[in-house]
Image (cartoon, helix red, strand yellow):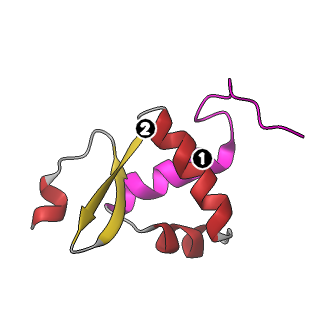
Amino acid sequence: MARAKSATSLSDPRRAEILKLIEENGPLTQSQIAKAMGMTWGQVQWHLYVLERDRKVRRVVKDGVTYYVSANASIDLLLE
């Protein structure tokens, strides 16, 4: 079964939970999100892709590590 391209980023409750987790806890890696959500790395990868595509989250690389932050979060969070 193919994934629907028209699905909105928050149409899946897991994406809403991931977004809430990121908003409440600040920058998180994909592995941290997977562990907190009890999901596989691949599942989280897909949900982050959709959230990023819909500009709900963005990725920031610091010291070679990729973090996900809320799209409306200040970039200064990672620079401290």
Report which residue position mark 1 lands on.
Answer: 15
- Towards the viewer: 73 or 31: 31
Residue shown at 58% from the left, 70% from the top: 34
Q: Tell me the element at label 1.
A: helix
Residue 62: in magenta span: no
Residue shown at 35% from the left, 65% from the top: 66
Query: Could you tell me how far apart the alpha carbons at marks 1 and 2 are, in whole angstroms?
Result: 10 Å
Q: Report the magenta residues as a range.
A: 1-26
Indicate the position of residue 26 as horizontal and vertical percent values: 31, 60
- Towards the viewer: 24 or 41: 41
- Towards the viewer: 74 or 65: 65
> Farthest top residue?
6
Report which residue position mark 2 lands on.
Answer: 56
Judged left or right of residue 43, residue 18 is left
Q: Amino acid at mark 2?
A: Lys
* Label 2 Cα crowd, 10 Å radius (few <14 / some 14-19 / many 20+): some
Indicate the position of residue 25 as horizontal and vertical percent values: 36, 63
Residue 80 drawn above or below residue 23: below
Residue shown at 25% from the left, 46% from the top: 73
Residue shown at 53% from the left, 54% from the top: 18
Q: Are marks 1 and 2 in contact (CB under 8 Å)?
A: yes
| Sequence-wise first label, 1 or 2 | 1
* Label 1 Cα crowd, 10 Å radius (few <14 / some 14-19 / many 20+): many
Indicate the position of residue 11 as horizontal and vertical percent values: 67, 33
Judged left or right of residue 78, residue 6 is right
Judged left or right of residue 66, residue 78 is left
